[in-house]
Image (tube, grey):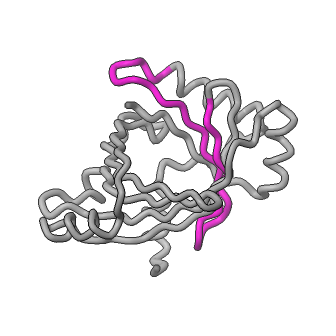
Amino acid sequence: MIEVEVKAKITSFSEMEKKLENIGATKSKKEFQEDIYFNSPIVNFAESDEALRIRTTKENDNVDIFITYKGPKIDKKSKTRKEIEMKIEDAEKCSDIFEAIGFRKVRTVRKNRQYYTYENFEISLDDIEGLDPYMEIEIGLKDGEDYSKAQKSIFDLFEKLNITEGFDRTSYLELLENLNITN
């Protein structure tokens, strides 16, 4: 899958919730996410712009765990990249396997995420431990599909929400690393 994603810093969750409600976006779910990021023993993911993580999500009593690989960004305006994800049963065992074959834990990123749906967009309001509020808008495409139209529609939606600046291609992991905040 190709994930076409654009992220922007926002000033207020409540203000953005009102704007989303005004355009007809539907609040879909709220969950806590804990992402454990790893670096490869062969390639420095910070330099190659890749990511490997184990994500544990908690929504009420429901817990899901996923391994996700994200390839390098493929354009200069967004976080568009190939994403491969697989549901797993046990985060601790998976982490042990990664470390046994030479992968190294880099950082854990924790956030509360409120999801909205609007047309073919998935929108999230992200409250990340150690960072200011952010909003992400994404569209998932099949491999080989042209992402430029999806990317334009995301920027058009941001404009509809009166967001014309504050865009950031940097991952939450990188933002926290740049602030040198420890977990």
Q: Nearer the viewer, residue 21 or 151?
A: 21
Q: Nearer the viewer, residue 40 or 96?
A: 96
Residue 132 falls left or right of residue 179: right
92 over 62 or under it: above or below: below
Q: Position of residue 148 (x, y in %)?
A: 48, 22
In the rendered structure, does residue 166 fall within the stretch colored magenta? no
Quarter of the image for the N terminus: give it. Answer: top left
Residue 85 falls left or right of residue 178: left
Quadrant in which residue 162 is drawn: top right
Q: Position of residue 164 (x, y in %)?
A: 70, 40
The residue most toward the bottom is: 182
Residue at x-position 49% and y-position 78%: 181
Quadrant in which residue 112 is drawn: bottom right
The magenta span reads 121-148
Question: What count of labels does the image hold?
Answer: 0
Q: Position of residue 169 (x, y in %)?
A: 49, 48
Residue 133 falls left or right of residue 50: right
Residue at x-position 47% and y-position 53%: 170
Q: Position of residue 37 (x, y in %)?
A: 35, 63
Residue at x-position 34% and y-position 62%: 90
117 over 88 or under it: above or below: above
Residue at x-position 35% and y-position 53%: 88
Residue 124 falls left or right of residue 144: right
Q: Nearer the viewer, residue 138 or 113?
A: 113
